């Protein structure tokens, strides 16, 4: 299995507090992604990175920021958590896509509850 | 309109049945296509890529129709272990490669 770990795996926090989720990979893959998954919505892309310091927005980026200061780590930050950000967050990695192929390998997920 | 749409679930089928899932995508610049499987409370895992010529992996067959912007997954001889959520995924190059998922279709296979 690809080496990808997320931390924390579970977190309960209060509205208005900052939260940072970490995704760490040992595969030296260029691409990293953050998704959230909610019932009825499936996986929605928040932000993604295609290299160190290179990031772009996804479908639901409002309220989230990301940073990638080194290849192996991709951080997702909620500056001021809201109850609508209660979700399961998945990180994914992908090797350099060729011809558009971009197979993702996912971390185990981080379950965030905002009270 | 969502970029990737799937049949609403759940699908409830008996063991041995054949079941088909459909998925449509709206961005004609989409480049590659996949089906992922997700078990309850687990991460998604790649089931199979989808090629224009169609491809088969054991009991699973995937088809792509670029003209209609439609992909499908056929599962033959369903097993209890096939019970899961099946996610359609579309990869596109918008300066960087990003993958957009459908909401998923839940399958229950019953004895």
Image: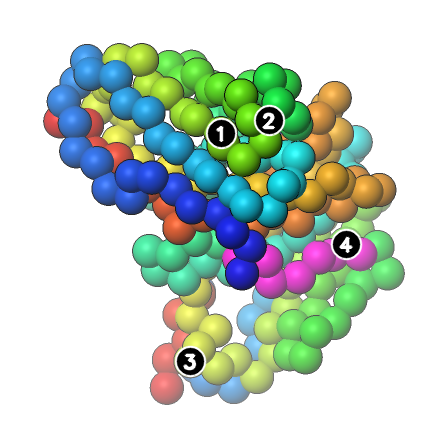
Q: Main secondary structure of the magenta part?
A: strand
Residue A59 is at least partly visible in this image: no
Read off the residue under disc 4: B64
Q: Secondary structure at mark 2?
A: strand
- Judged left or right of residue B73, residue B111 is left
Q: Secondary structure at mark 4?
A: strand
Determine the residue positioned at 64% across, 69% down.
Answer: B74
Q: Characterize the local packing of mark 2: few (<14), some (14-19) or many (20 or more) Cα atoms within 10 angstroms.
A: many
Discs 2, 3: same chain? no
Q: Nearer the viewer, mark 1 or mark 4?
A: 1
- Judged left or right of residue A70, residue A83 is left
Give the alpha-carbon distance from disc 1 to disc 3, as whole Å.
37 Å
Q: Nearer the viewer, residue B98 or A95?
A: A95
Are the residues tagged 2 and 1 within 8 Å (C-beta)?
yes
Give the alpha-carbon distance from disc 4 to disc 3, as whole Å.
26 Å
Q: Is residue B49 magenta?
A: yes
- Marker disc for residue B80: 3
Read off the residue under disc 1: A74
Residue A96 is at least partly visible in this image: yes
Q: Position of residue B80 (x, y in %)?
A: 42, 80
Determine the residue positioned at 60% across, 17% down.
Answer: A53
Residue A42, relative to residue B12: is it above or below?
Answer: above
Are the residues tagged 4 and 2 within 8 Å (C-beta)?
no
Q: Position of residue A16 (x, y in %)?
A: 19, 13
Residue B50, relative to residue B2: is it above or below?
Answer: below
Residue A63, relative to residue A8: is it above or below?
Answer: above
- Marker disc for residue A49: 2
């Amino acid at each position: 299995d690809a080496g990808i770990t997320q931390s924390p795996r579970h977190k309960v926090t209060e509205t208005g507090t900052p939260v940072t989720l970490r995704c760490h990979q040992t595969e030296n893959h260029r691409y990293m992604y953050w998704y959230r998954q909610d019932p009825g919505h499936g996986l929605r892309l928040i932000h993604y990175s295609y290299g160190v310091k290179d990031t772009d927005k996804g479908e639901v980026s409002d309220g989230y920021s990301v940073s990638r200061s080194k290849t192996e780590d991709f951080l997702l930050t909620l500056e001021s958590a809201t109850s609508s950000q209660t979700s399961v967050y998945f990180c994914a990695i992908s090797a350099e896509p060729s011809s558009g192929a971009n197979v993702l390998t996912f971390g185990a997920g981080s379950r965030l509850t905002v009270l | 309109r969502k970029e990737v749409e799937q049949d609403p679930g759940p699908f409830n089928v008996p063991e041995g049945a054949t079941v088909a899932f459909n998925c449509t995508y709206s961005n004609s610049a989409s480049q590659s296509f996949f089906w992922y499987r997700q078990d309850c409370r687990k991460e998604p895992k790649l089931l199979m890529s989808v090629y224009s010529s169609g491809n088969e992996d054991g009991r699973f067959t995937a088809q792509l129709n670029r003209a209609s912007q439609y992909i499908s997954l056929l599962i033959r001889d369903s097993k209890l272990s096939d019970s899961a959520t099946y996610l359609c995924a579309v990869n596109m190059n918008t300066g960087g490669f990003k993958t957009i998922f459908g909401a998923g279709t839940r399958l229950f296979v019953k004895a």
